[in-house]
């Protein structure tokens, strides 16, 4: 049996819509098989993973908390990848955003003012953008591969945070825990509906960013520029667009959003700086962006889906025998299916059973 | 044994996986395919080798398990990018994410289990030569394999007919196809070779470098490997030289920590990653050399016309 692809005369709108859904269904089927192989009751496992977390209000709050950073980062990545700039280092920009924003409450402990929080958020976004400026500079001016540089910077950022929270920024009264002082109330991102759960403003930032980015892509010249340069740098140059400037724009934009996500996470859900602040949000956001087919509005929906996998993983740890590692396996599988299903948008897939090949051109 | 000798031996152990995985990726990229999943294939190789060695009691069976696992895992990437023509960058990332997760799940029961170590092969008489003996003739199998691979890959690419075809596929898949070369099959074989090498490199990590299973124990080495191929401008001997350079940076950083240099350990740990960036910048500045050596079809999908 052979698989043959035939290019569609037109891009399929139907599959553009169906492909993420199909990918999700296929990933769920693969997940079921995986649980069955592990000797678990698949129905029970899937229920624990994907249904139970949705049944209680506090748990929906947790969903919003986890979806916030995923969406925020993914929105930036959508624009970045569309312009053919491969920022893989959002995890590092997230970390550096958290560090830059936390600087204010940790260093200026005596400063109490309503200005603290807005300045922290701003500093977080700037920190993320500046950290993303490194691969941008190297790509734009030295022609260095941005995939590798942005990724190496993730390891460097994590080590830097590790040093800060065990070294100079460690809380002297922290009973030897490697963490900073707890943020004072004016430095904490407030909850939205305090009575029912912990969800904070991070999710609002995410939704607003998604809408703004969608508007930018759809209705502005910048959006057109992103699309043209992303599809063909040559065509873009003929239109008078600069791919060098686009490198800067894409990286600063996605870095700022990742940085904002970082400081929101630290100030909204953790409350202090510590060596590990992210369960891989920066990498999972890559999956979010692709599941959304690089559409910022779609990222809201796909961010919620992947946030659910994190919640499910936490819930699964409570039920015996189901591994929390199943989360990352499921996330990886999902990305595989998303990418394969996207092929259906551009090609018709034919299974050829005969071994004889038709006349080759 | 002198201190210098001891340091040299640890540098060799740290460099071997980089050289092996780098040579594999070099062949893949020479065929025009960019597989960013080295980190994922490496960690799958590491866990498979560890489990294989545990179950059989033999590190050699473990080594073989690692190689086979890496090759099979790379087939996933091959199927998506070659048969379904998905984006190679994104698919490589998917392979890494899946590999890190899957290895964590498979290895869950093996954390802090004492490992089976691959022992040195001692060449009689030769190993007695002062200095050279222990360095060249008292190493484990993976070191000898890495040397054989450098020579083998170099010969294959530049001296054999099949290697010529593979380079043709990487430089212009359209022309290669017109000449009757099966582009897709060539690329499948290259991808599987790369997977096997990454698997072997991972096996070295869990059987030689630190003979135990630790989650995420590849620690970015797969990514360094990718930088290494660019650094080497797609030449096997330079992959070896670069691999040893990176290995040396990694080891010297440990020794600096041991000697109590007044720099926090985290900053010393940044060195391998930081130096990777620096080296990449230096290499990429020389645009002309990079352009000449880069396989022209690198990263581009090929759909045969029917």
Image (cartoon, rainbow, N blue to C red):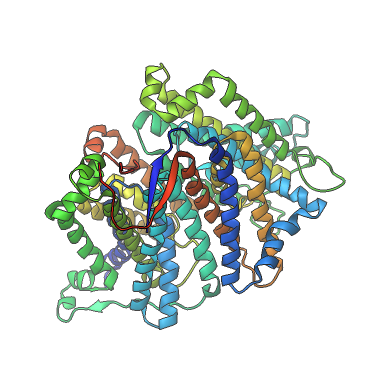
Residue A178 visible (yes or no): yes
Q: In this view, does B17 lie to the left or right of A134?
A: left
Q: Which is more toward the observer, A71 or A160?
A: A71
In the picture as drawn, the residue positioned furthest to the bottom comes out as B57
Relative to A326, residue A348 above or below: above
Which percent across, then down, holds residue A324?
62, 63
Q: Is residue A160 left or right of residue B21?
A: right
Q: Residue at x 29, y 45 (%)?
A: B32
Q: Residue at x 17, y 44 (%)?
A: B179
Count of labels in the image: 0
Q: Which residue is drawn at 57% across and 49% down?
A: A22
Q: Which is more toward the observer, B152 or B31?
A: B31
Q: Would you identify the image quadrant in which residue B197 lies?
A: bottom left
Q: Residue at x 30, y 68 (%)?
A: B6
Relative to B276, residue B160 above or below: below
Q: Is residue A158 left or right of residue A361?
A: right
Q: Quadrant of the C terminus of chain A?
A: top left
Which percent across, then down, holds residue A111?
75, 34
Q: In which quarter of the image is the N terminus of chain A?
A: bottom left
Which percent across, then down, holds residue A164?
58, 48
Q: Would you identify the image quadrant in which residue A189 lies?
A: top right
Relative to A70, residue A3 above or below: below
């Amino acid at each position: 049996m052979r698989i043959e692809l035939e290019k569609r005369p037109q891009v399929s709108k139907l599959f553009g819509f169906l492909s993420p859904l199909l990918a999700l269904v296929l990933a769920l089927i693969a997940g079921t098989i995986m649980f069955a192989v592990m000797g678990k009751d698949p129905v029970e496992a899937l229920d624990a993973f994907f249904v139970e977390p949705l049944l209680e209000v506090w748990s929906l709050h947790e969903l919003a908390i986890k979806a916030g950073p995923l969406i925020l980062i993914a929105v930036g990545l959508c624009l970045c990848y569309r312009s053919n700039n491969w920022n893989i280092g959002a995890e590092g920009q997230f970390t550096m955003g958290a560090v830059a924003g936390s600087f204010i409450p940790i260093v200026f402990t005596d400063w109490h003012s309503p200005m603290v929080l807005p300045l922290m958020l701003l500093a977080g976004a700037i920190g993320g953008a500046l950290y993303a400026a490194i691969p941008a500079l190297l790509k734009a001016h030295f022609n260095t591969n941005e995939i590798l540089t942005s990724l190496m910077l993730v390891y460097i950022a994590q080590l830097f945070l590790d040093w800060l929270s065990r070294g100079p920024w460690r809380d002297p009264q922290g009973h030897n825990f490697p963490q900073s002082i707890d943020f004072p109330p004016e430095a904490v991102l407030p909850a939205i509906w305090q009575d029912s759960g912990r969800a904070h403003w991070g999710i609002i930032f995410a939704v607003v960013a998604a809408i703004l980015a969608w508007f930018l892509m759809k209705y502005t010249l910048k959006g057109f520029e992103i699309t043209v340069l992303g599809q063909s740098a040559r065509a873009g140059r003929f239109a008078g667009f600069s791919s060098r400037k686009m490198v800067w724009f894409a990286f600063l934009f996605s870095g700022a959003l990742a940085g904002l996500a970082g400081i929101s996470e630290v100030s909204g859900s953790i409350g202090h700086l510590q060596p590990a602040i992210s369960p891989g949000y920066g990498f999972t956001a890559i999956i979010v962006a692709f599941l959304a087919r690089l559409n910022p509005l779609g990222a809201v929906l796909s961010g919620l889906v992947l946030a659910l996998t994190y919640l499910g993983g936490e819930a699964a740890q409570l039920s015996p025998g189901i591994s929390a590692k199943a989360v990352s396996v499921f996330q990886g599988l999902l990305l595989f299916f998303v990418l394969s299903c996207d092929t259906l948008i551009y090609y018709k897939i034919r299974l050829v059973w005969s071994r004889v090949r038709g006349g080759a051109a | 044994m002198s201190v210098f000798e001891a340091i040299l031996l640890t540098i060799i152990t740290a460099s071997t996986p980089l050289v092996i995985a780098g040579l594999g990726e070099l062949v893949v990229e020479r065929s025009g395919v960019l597989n960013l999943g080295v980190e994922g294939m490496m960690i799958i190789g590491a866990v498979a080798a560890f489990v294989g060695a545990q179950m059989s009691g033999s590190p050699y069976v473990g080594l073989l398990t690692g190689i086979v696992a890496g090759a099979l895992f790379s087939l996933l990437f091959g199927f998506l990018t070659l048969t379904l023509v998905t984006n190679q960058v994104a698919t490589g990332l998917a392979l890494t994410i899946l590999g890190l997760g899957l290895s964590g799940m498979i290895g869950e029961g093996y954390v802090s289990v004492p490992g089976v170590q691959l022992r040195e092969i001692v060449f009689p008489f030769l190993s007695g030569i002062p200095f050279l003996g222990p360095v060249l003739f008292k190493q484990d199998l993976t070191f000898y394999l890495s040397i054989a691979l450098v020579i083998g890959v170099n010969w294959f690419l530049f001296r054999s007919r099949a290697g010529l075809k593979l380079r043709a596929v990487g430089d212009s898949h359209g022309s290669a196809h017109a000449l009757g070369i099966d582009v897709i099959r060539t690329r499948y074989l290259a991808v599987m070779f790369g997977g096997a090498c990454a698997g072997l490199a991972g096996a070295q990590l869990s059987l030689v470098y630190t003979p135990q299973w630790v989650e995420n124990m590849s620690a970015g080495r797969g990514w360094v490997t990718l930088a290494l191929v660019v650094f080497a401008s797609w030449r096997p001997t330079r992959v070896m030289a670069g691999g040893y350079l990176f290995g040396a940076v990694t080891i010297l950083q440990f020794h600096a920590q041991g000697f109590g240099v007044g720099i926090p350990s985290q900053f010393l740990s940044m060195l391998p990653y930081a130096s990777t960036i620096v080296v990449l910048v230096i290499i990429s500045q020389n645009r002309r050399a990079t352009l000449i050596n880069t396989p022209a079809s690198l990263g581009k999908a090929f759909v045969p016309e029917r």
